[in-house]
């Protein structure tokens, strides 16, 4: 005889965790003879319908960056953390990989999605992106913190509005 516990979980992370059903089944080996001994009603939940299927995705190329800022990897990671905070996103984890002598790829897992940076010191340049689900985070604030830190002379960026389709708002900006 085996007790079988079956739990159906709702979505996790920024969507919140909720149980949609919790069944305890006494299993005799004959599935037709299974008997539910407890069924708890689902608590008030946050279902998919409670969340809009949309997000904003900033993709940017910075060139002519301040070399001291671009190659000071601890300070660059600090700037990334500050940029995430400024955007209003919630940092869950960060992973970074160093490419000697001064290259960096870092990905920050956010409750809302992700942020990343890929540096190319030999070109005084980097790629950055921030994708956040919903409409509460501010990609512009993320971008501003990194611009202030890296001082790029040229910036190309796009903010993609993502939902069932993707809208592309292209902007070419030259830093002062």
Image (spheres, rainbow, N blue to C red):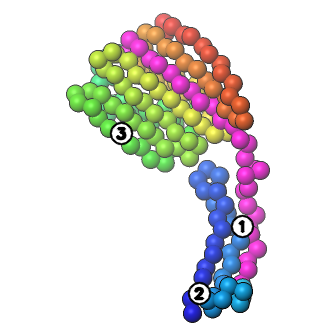
Look at the picture and state if 12 lies above or below 88: below
Q: CA distance from mark 1 to mark 3?
A: 37 Å
Number of numbered callouts drawn: 3
The N terminus lies in quadrant: bottom right
Q: Residue at x 72, y 35 (%)?
A: 164
Label for residue 20? Answer: 1
Q: Position of residue 152 (x, y in %)?
A: 42, 14
Q: What kind of element bears circle 3?
A: strand
- Indicate which disc, 2 or 1, sits on the residue closer to the N terminus: 2
- Indicate which disc, 1 or 3, sits on the residue closer to the N terminus: 1
Q: Position of residue 38 (x, y in %)?
A: 71, 84
Q: Position of residue 89 (x, y in %)?
A: 56, 40
Label for residue 3? Answer: 2
Label for residue 95? Answer: none
Q: Judge left or right: residue 172 versus residue 102.
A: right
Q: Are marks 1 and 3 in contact (CB under 8 Å)?
A: no
Mark 3: few/some/many CA within 10 Å (<14, 14-19, 20+): some
Asked if residue 44 lies in the magenta stretch, the reply is: yes
Q: Judge left or right: residue 115 versus residue 75.
A: right
Q: CA distance from mark 2 to mark 3?
A: 44 Å
Q: Which residue is situated farthest in the left direction here?
A: 101
Q: Which residue is mark 3?
A: 96
Question: In this rendering, which labeled residue sits more in front, label 2 or label 3?
Answer: 2
- Magenta segment boundaries in residue numbering: 38-65
Q: Are marks 2 and 1 in contact (CB under 8 Å)?
A: no
């Amino acid at each position: 005889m085996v007790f079988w516990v079956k739990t159906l979980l709702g979505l996790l992370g920024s969507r919140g965790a909720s149980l949609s059903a919790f069944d305890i089944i006494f299993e005799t080996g004959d599935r037709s003879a299974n008997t539910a001994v407890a069924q708890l009603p689902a608590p008030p939940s946050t279902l998919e319908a409670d969340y809009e299927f949309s997000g904003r995705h900033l993709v940017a190329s910075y060139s002519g960056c301040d070399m001291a800022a671009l190659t000071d990897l601890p300070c660059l990671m600090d700037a990334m953390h500050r940029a995430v905070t400024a955007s209003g996103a919630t940092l869950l984890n960060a992973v970074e990989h160093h490419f000697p002598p001064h290259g960096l790829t870092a990905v920050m897992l956010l409750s809302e999605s992700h942020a990343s940076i890929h540096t190319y010191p030999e070109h005084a340049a980097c790629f950055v992106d921030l994708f956040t689900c919903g409409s509460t985070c501010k990609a512009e604030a993320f971008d501003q913190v990194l611009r202030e830190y890296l001082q790029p002379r040229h910036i190309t960026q796009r903010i993609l509005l993502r939902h069932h389709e993707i809208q592309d708002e292209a902007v070419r900006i030259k830093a002062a």
